[in-house]
Image (tube, rainbow, N blue to C red):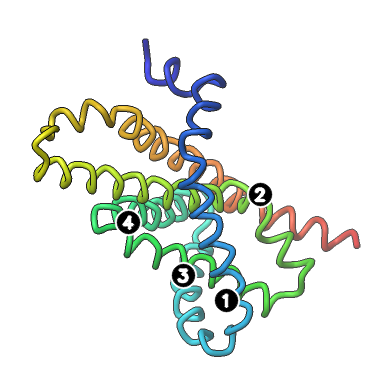
Amino acid sequence: MSFTDKYLNFNYLKSYLSFIKKYAICSIVILIISFILGIMYSGDISYLMNMIMADMADSMEIFGIAGFIDIFTHNLQSDLIMIFGGVLFSIISIFGMFINGAMLGYVATITPIFDFLLLIIPHGIFEIPSWILSLSAAFMITTLIIRLLSSLVSDEKTIKDEINDSKDLIEAIIVSIVLVVILLLIAGFIENFITGALYQFIMSII
């Protein structure tokens, strides 16, 4: 049975979402808090946010397939850092989510609300869930690391036993990474080929 047949089907995805629920809720709470803080302290973080946005703007100036690849690789790198930050007990991962959420909040304060929604929603409905899954995967990796470290000092379980007992967790981490890649591919395509054109079209008829 292929990976797609086994994992990327409705029945597994339903159980997967149930399995990662507590990790996803924590990730969403952190995103919401960082978004609110980005709005509240937009003036204080403007210098940092403008530096980050200037770097991102370089990708927006590349068009066509090259632009899509640039956006995708940039976002994938960011999400992979968040995911594998779980090895370091998710400290880097939480910081990464705070940057993403604060940047979103900051942009909301400097952009007219209608423009903000038009420019964020089309690709954001895929990219923002990728952040949530990335941080959830980081938390799961941290959970796995803690379990493995605990097995080192346990007389009841070996590392091999813990790995066998954590198969569901390991599978969920792998599926999360695959879903993040899929979401970012879709988000990158929409951001590069659709968001700008859709914005221009809507603005031209209102």
The extreme right residue here reads 206
- Percent x, y of residue 146: 23, 48
Which residue position holds label 3?
99
Question: How far is the residue under mark 3 from the one under mark 1?
Answer: 9 Å
Which three-letter amino acid code belongs to the residue tagged 4?
Answer: Ile
Res 38 label: 1
Q: Are marks 2 and 4 in contact (CB under 8 Å)?
A: no
Q: Nearer the viewer, mark 4 or mark 1?
A: 1
Looking at the rendered structure, the kind of residue marked 2 is Ile
- Residue at horizontal 42%, vertical 38%? 176
* Residue under numbered circle 2: 194
Which badge, 2 or 4, comes first in the chain's sequence? Answer: 4
**Mark 2 or mark 4: which is in front?**
4
Q: Is residue 4 left or right of residue 109?
A: left
- Disc 3 vs disc 2: which is toward the camera? 3
The residue pinned by badge 4 equals: 81
Going from the N terminus, do you reach mark 3 or mark 2 first?
3
Residue 156, image x, y percentages: 13, 33
Crowding at label 1, few (<14), some or many (≥20) Cα neighbours within 10 Å? many
- Tag 1: residue type? Gly
The answer for how far apart the CA atoms under marks 4 and 3 are is 13 Å
Q: SS class of the residue under badge 2? A: helix
The crowding category of the residue bearing disc 3, from other C-alpha atoms within 10 Å (few below 14, some 14 to 19, many at least 20), is some
61 versus 135 height, above or below: below
Q: Label 3 is placed on what type of residue?
A: Ile
**Which of the marked residues, 2 or 1, is nearer the chain's N terminus?**
1
Secondary structure of the residue carrying numbered label 4: helix
Question: For the residues marked 4 and 1, what is the alpha-carbon distance in whole angstroms?
Answer: 21 Å
Instruction: Report, in whole angstroms, how far the alpha carbon at label 2 lies from the one at label 1.
Output: 27 Å
